[in-house]
Image (cartoon, rainbow, N blue to C red):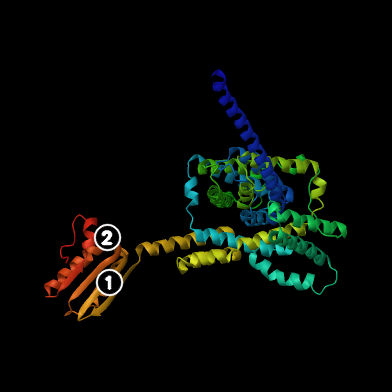
Amino acid sequence: MARLKVFPQRAQERESGKSHKTSWGKDVSASLVVFLVALPLCMGIAIASGVSPVKGLVTGVIGGLVVGALSGSPLQVSGPAAGLAVIIFELVREHGMAALAPVLMLAGVMQLVAGMLKTGRFFRAISPEVIHGMLAGIGVLIVIQQFHVVLDRTPKASGPKNIVAMGEAVFGGLFPLNGSAEEWAALVGVTTIAVMLLWEKLRPASMKLIPGALLGIAAGTALAQGMHLGVKRVSVPSNLGEMVTLPTWSSFSMHGFGEMSWSAMLTAALALAFIASAETLLSAAAVEAMQTRVRTDYDKELAAQGVGNLLCGVLGALPMTGVIVRSSANVHAGAESRRSTMLHGVWIVLTLSALPFVLRMVPMASLAGVLLVVGVKLVKPSDVLRLKRFGWAPVAVYLASLITIVATNLLTGVMVGVGLSLLSLLWRVTHVEARLEEQEGEAQVHLAGVGTFFSIPKIASVLDAIDAAAPVRIHTAELRFIDHSVLELIESWVERRQQNGGVVVVEMEQLHRRFVTPVSRVA
């Protein structure tokens, strides 16, 4: 009997050990998949941000090792995001790299404080049409910007200028075909895109976890190396120490970040923190919906992102968010815990320290090709169709956000979208329909929607238009809400009408339960 008591315990221990080993195996396998997805995206997003590719890789390391350890969403992967590339590109172009560190550190502190104050859930309170419009606008900007990088050209400063310059690039660099440098770079970029798209369409189920971006870049690199093409390639420092740039005290002086004022710096940091937090927490919500293994602590995740961005600012890297593409790859690869996210950061470190010469072979046009595909995927016509189910107002907000982002900048576009959403909400909560119909000699007044003091002019104009001799019936069954101001308007109008000998029936029974003192003349 003694053996029977000990045996289940040992069996349980062996089973637990087996489960632990299985969990480790799944996490290691998933981390390799995430690493292969993250490597080209980290470098490509850095290029789209107008900085060295290594800056994106450093952010990927911090997102894996630091944020992965602290994250409130254990299966979410953090790193440089396409959604922030537009902001960073404009910031670096206008104020130089010196401004990036203090802005990013301030944004990290804001996120950390917001997480500690438990405001994570409020960052998710953004209307879907604004989010979809923001992502679509970012996608358009990435496409028109990286179009120039595919040709080994430098992108212009704004969306409209990039669009105008696209025609010049096509007819001044590509055509007529004469073997120019732009044509060879375009060949590398098109090869990368073609391999990516073909792999997504034709890859066997057994190899679904191998990312097309990696194969596309491998094909573009092989083409450039095999044909000895004189295209621009990735620049990577020879050692890890050269990959980080620590800020100095002068970075925080007015001279350090150029002509950028403290108010401008705070505004940029606030915009960065807001958009990064919103994107992170929306991604975390999507990751939670994908699986049932772990739950998300949104406040903890927001604080972890703040620590990560603060450290990115200290080390001179790019800002980070939780990123859905890498997180989705992590979940679908079978990750069981945060170990997968952390290990993918380890693999990036090993690549930077042991294989920098491989990264230096990668053509810039090949990375730009990857980003072109990413940008196109951000613009989803299906989003418009889904929004259309709820009327044209969400579609209008979506298009306004998209167009404003492309025409001006990301922050302005988001603010326009949020403003229009609030106006749409205000209209819905204050809108009332008041129509007058005549039926069998009786004036029928139909009220629908929300009856508040905003509604008084419209309702009063309908009531005043009724013929003095006609009997009146007022229908309120379709009113979702009616406040005291509208009640008083109807009461006083009914009283005057009846004093003049008129017949009025007000059907308002459904409102008796909402008010202590009901309308005095109710049929």
Q: Residue at x 76, y 73 (%)?
A: 171
- Residue occupying the far front of the picture: 1
Give coordinates of residue 148: x percent, y percent. 73, 64
**The quadrant where residue 133 appears:** bottom right
Left or right of 104? Residue 455 is: left
- Residue type at mark 1 is His
As drawn, 142 above or below 272: below
Q: From where the camera sits, is residue 465 visible?
A: yes
- In the rendered image, which residue does mark 1 sit on? 446
As drawn, 127 above or below 339: below
- In the rendered image, which residue does mark 2 sit on? 483
**The quadrant where residue 435 appears:** bottom left
Q: Residue at x 43, y 64 (%)?
A: 424
Give coordinates of residue 282: x percent, y percent. 54, 51
Depth-wise, is mark 1 or mark 2 nearer the camera?
A: 1
Give coordinates of residue 57: x percent, y percent. 71, 47
